[in-house]
Amino acid sequence: MLDAKIPAGPLKEKWANHKLHLKLVNPANKRKYQIIVVGTGLAGSSAAATLAELGYRVKVFCIQDSPRRAHSIAAQGGINAAKNYANDGDSIERLFYDTIKGGDFRSREANVYRLAEVSNNIIDHCVAQGVPFAREYSGYLDNRSFGGAQVSRTFYARGQTGQQLLLGAYSALMKEVARDNIQLFPRSEMLDVVTIDGAAKGIITRNLITGKIESHSADAVIMATGGYSSVYYLSTNAKACNATAIWRAHKRGAYMANPCFTQIHPTCIPVHGEYQSKLTLMSEGLRNDGRVWVPKNVNDKRDPSKIQLSERDYFLERKYPTFGNLVPRDIASRSAKEICDSGLGVGQSGMAVYLDLTDAIKRIGKEKIAERYGNLFEMYEKISGDNPYETPMMIYPAPHYTMGGLWVDYNLMSTINGLFVIGEANFSDHGANRLGASALMQGLADGYFVIPYTIGDYLAQNNPIEMDLTTFPAFREAEGQVVQKVSRLLGSKGKRTADDFHKQLGKLLWDKCGMTRTESGLREALNQIPSIRQEFWENVNVPGSGEDLNQSLEKAGRVADYLEFAELFVTDALNRKESCGGHFREEYQTPEGEAKRDDENYCYVAAWEFQENAEPILHKEPLKFESVNLTQRSYK
Amino acid sequence: MEKKLNLKLMIWRQSGPKSNGQFETYKVKDIDVSMSFLEMLDVLNETLTKEGQEPVAFDHDCREGICGTCGAMVNGKAHGKLKGTTLCQLHMRHFENNETIVIEPWRAKGFPVIKDLVVDRSAFDRIISSGGYISAKTGSAPDANAIPIPKENVEQSMDAAACIGCGACVAACPNAAAMLFVGAKISHLALLPQGKVESKTRTSNMVRQMDKEGFGNCSNEYECEASCPKGISVSTIADMNREFLFSKTPPKS
């Protein structure tokens, strides 16, 4: 039976009470504990820095050449907090409710409340660290609005909020490196987690420069390895983002929760060629001032400026007058898809809609718009060759974020003792759809303000090992398996590249398990994945050796894991016979075409247990709502 | 139909840090002008792989100009000739049919080559580690609005904070100086009241580390500013010098 370990008592007091009851490690004993942190995005960096400040010994691993380059860096729009500086009626309760509702009532109430509760501390801390958040002329902090909220609670640093927050966390991390509290291992990829007597005691890594397979032991392991959007091949994620770490942990006993909950972001630059390697997001912040539209008439190929107001369909404003262009992401994406599928899409491929800031430019001037979105406009122009100050941008949805991930309890511990999972890599806070500017909030909440408390409780109950366990059989065995897998990949001298297989898998998933899903489509995908996987192992070509930098080998290993993960991903989508948030099953919709939940049968977290050579086992964690009423989400 | 390009690429190939490198010539055909430069290299690498050759190693990640991972000298210019642009955001529409493109790694003592176009920029991490932070511990902060900061200062601070740490400034500088990188961090923090407190020690420690890593000195060529994909101004170097000059605190030993 899955125990989420949600503390007793009223929702508002749970976290405070829990903190009071958590066991502590005394300051002198902290340095006896070794903690491993894998991943240096917002969650990983903030956790590592904070734990090191507390006095623990920390080893930090990342696949990038520097921890500063983790993909959190690319987050543009902002970070939410319930500061209510705008005096527009915001509160912890409202942020909590918006997040629960935005997630279509598929997240854990207690976790979401805690997230809203610590949101304000994050802003305070980031300002103290030197994050240059946007300010008003008074010198006080400025806010903007994001989808799914009717208040302005989003703090931002131009269109580079993720960058600034990550540089803050990275600098805190580097400060602890200088003080020898953190040992840093860049260009290292985690390839397995090692358990002894059912508890995580270390990891196996590959040094990406020398190819050396290494073992590292610790008292606890924290994974902050991000999401799996790039299972679709084309996504807004960085090229190195992958599911290898979470998949290997899953195979060692960590349950995978709600993998079918993926977020397709509505405002991305449309696909424009077969060779394309990634998609680029245009911040949701643009929907504050931008209006989304298509021509009312099919085949209206005129220049957008020639199309009169009366000939345009501002479909989000029409369908959702209350929230308008600021409906949550899943709804905005699906609406764009529907419009394009009905033949009204624009651009060469017809798979795009306009995001038009002309009205805002007229209203507040080009200068003000440039101040808010200048860098985004430049980026758009570089990629598309069009100037968005003069002609409306074209956008289309793209895979962006994954709400699913490794299952964790309230303490952020997975089903493996001592293996903690934070940030996008876990499943906990966003339910079936994440609201904009909430990923940064969750990553930093987990790293700065949750894990430092909860991991202490675990450590306090386990004596420090104070020795190197890497000579133990469990490590030798795991290392041997990793070596074997690497050499199997290097022995593959077939005719196709790893990217080729990745594209094939990605296209299949995008078609069958993307913005909308059907039973038959999912079954078809489930049939095809094993044969792609089989061909991969028979026909992939991995050049080079294992003894130096070999990017082809890295890629092939990640694709191999995606080819296994994909099956679970589709299985979960097939199991969930309801529509909720980003998971839209065509069979289950309201007469107006909105997602239709089935609270009676699917109000649970689907946590999957891995079985070697057998179907995964489904464990259900029922979601109990004590303080909100489950309603049909309405943004009309 | 969009234009297609045929190109001759001269690429620096070097199998490891200690081996000698050399230029190799490759031809790529039918390159779509809407491809990014890195997508063009992907096309080359896919072909090389299928032919059983080892692809060209190059660093890249976000491919949207923010992570700072990618970078190479393209026809002698860091990140190529387009101003304010990282290599991943340089698109092939800026090249001519039948052009020869010379592609080299960053060249600097502080950035040893690892393989082909990949260099070791860990010196930047060590410089940040020497002082590029505000020592605020988690949990100790007052309310975010407790200290108002003039909008102008924050805007200037943000201009400097936009640095992505790609290393183009070093690669473009005839002295391989890292002063734009260091100056940007010093300015970013010194312009904020929170960062002012440690500014002097920060500056002397960072400058000392910068020298230790083997980076050169500034001789006012302004090549760094010209090559910076984020438009960081050389005035940050002046800020650094000013902070350094008035630094009363001896560096930490």
Image (cartoon, rainbow, N blue to C red):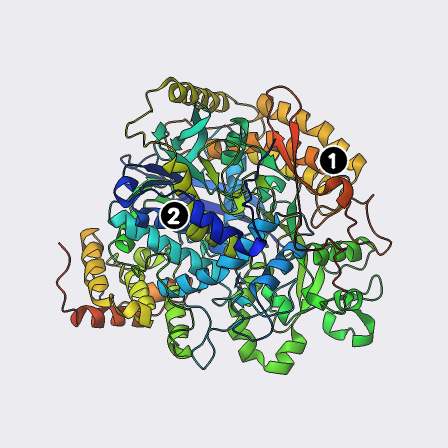
Outermost residue on the front side: it is A9
In the image: residue A145, left or right of residue B90 = right
In the image: residue A224, left or right of residue A400 = left
Q: Quadrant of residue B185 in the image?
A: bottom left
Q: Quadrant of the C terminus of chain A?
A: bottom right
The chain that hosts pointer 1 is: A
Please state the horizontal and vertical placement of residue B225, each as a whole percent of the image. Answer: 35, 66
Q: Is residue B123 above or below residue B242?
A: above
Camera-side residue of B43 and A551: A551
Residue at the (67%, 54%) spot, across then down: A397
Question: Where residue A67 is drawn, which disc sits there?
Answer: 2
Question: Where residue A344 is drawn, which disc sits there?
Answer: none
Mark 2 or 1: the one toward you: 1
Q: Secondary structure at mark 1?
A: helix
- Crowd class of label 1 (few under 14; some 14 to 19; many from 20; radius 10 Å): many
Circles 2 and 1 on the same subunit? yes
In the image: residue A538, left or right of residue B151 = right
Q: Is residue A485 above or below residue B28?
A: above
Camera-side residue of A431 and A248: A431
Q: Is residue B37 above or below residue A293?
A: above
User: Which residue is identified by label 1?
Assistant: A574
**Residue A41 visible, this angle:** no
- Crowd class of label 2 (few under 14; some 14 to 19; many from 20; radius 10 Å): many
Q: What amino acid type is highlighted by mark number 1?
A: Leu
Camera-side residue of A469 and A542: A469
Please state the horizontal and vertical placement of residue A189, each as a whole percent of the image. Answer: 42, 35
